[in-house]
Amino acid sequence: MGTTVLALIGLFNVFGTYTAGWLGGRMSKPKLLTGLYLLRAVVIVIFLWVPVTQITAYLFGMAMGFLWLSTVPLTNGTVATLFGVRNLSMLGGIVFLFHQIGSFLGGWLGGVVYDHTGNYDLIWQVAIVLSLVAAVLNWPVRERPVARLQAQMEAA
């Protein structure tokens, strides 16, 4: 079952990333990010409330797959809007670096929590809180170039 869930995550990543990129060209990227992070929290809460069966695991994999990498085009688009494309590779690399640090900490801390408690409940709760924090942090972001970049664009 685990391999099928992982395959569903990968498959639905394709659809989620494409859909988010398409929507990001038509709507506010920070607001879409807010919605994605809220949906992640909701999906995790629902998964924790329902009995774990093959069907609920598959549905969870599909939902999380759709939401997982769908943040990438929106984040890169927001960074490009705010800071321009000149240093987008470097800024994207910084974003990716912190993503990898978070991935390591999530996996490692998940193991530590499991070793101490015998379950992953606390890590799921942390994931919900972090999703909500990410939603709150993205909501006020204004999609306009920073002042320095705006001045450069007007001078050109």
Image: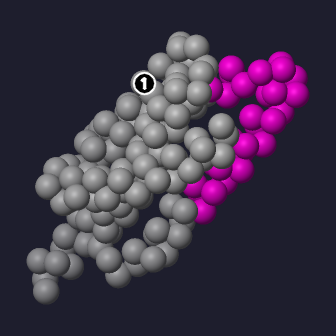
What x and y, as percent, mark residue 18? 31, 59
Query: In which quadrant of the rendered image does the N terminus lie?
Result: top right
Q: Nearer the viewer, residue 151 or 122?
A: 122
User: Label 1: how many residues lie within 10 Å, few (<14), some (14-19) or many (20+)?
Assistant: some
Residue type highlighted by circle 1:
Val
Q: Which residues are magenta?
A: 97-124
| Label 1 sits on residue | 42
What x and y, as percent, mark residue 73? 35, 61
Q: In the shown orientation, is residue 100 left or right of residue 120?
A: left
Name the residue at 61% across, 20% down.
Answer: 52
Can residue 112 be seen here? The reply is yes
Query: In which quadrant of the rendered image does the C terminus lie?
Result: bottom left
Return the residue found at the far bottom.
Answer: 156
Q: Nearer the viewer, residue 147 or 98?
A: 98
Answer above or below: position of 4 versus 126. Answer: below
Majority secondary structure of the magenta segment? helix
Q: Is residue 47 magenta?
A: no
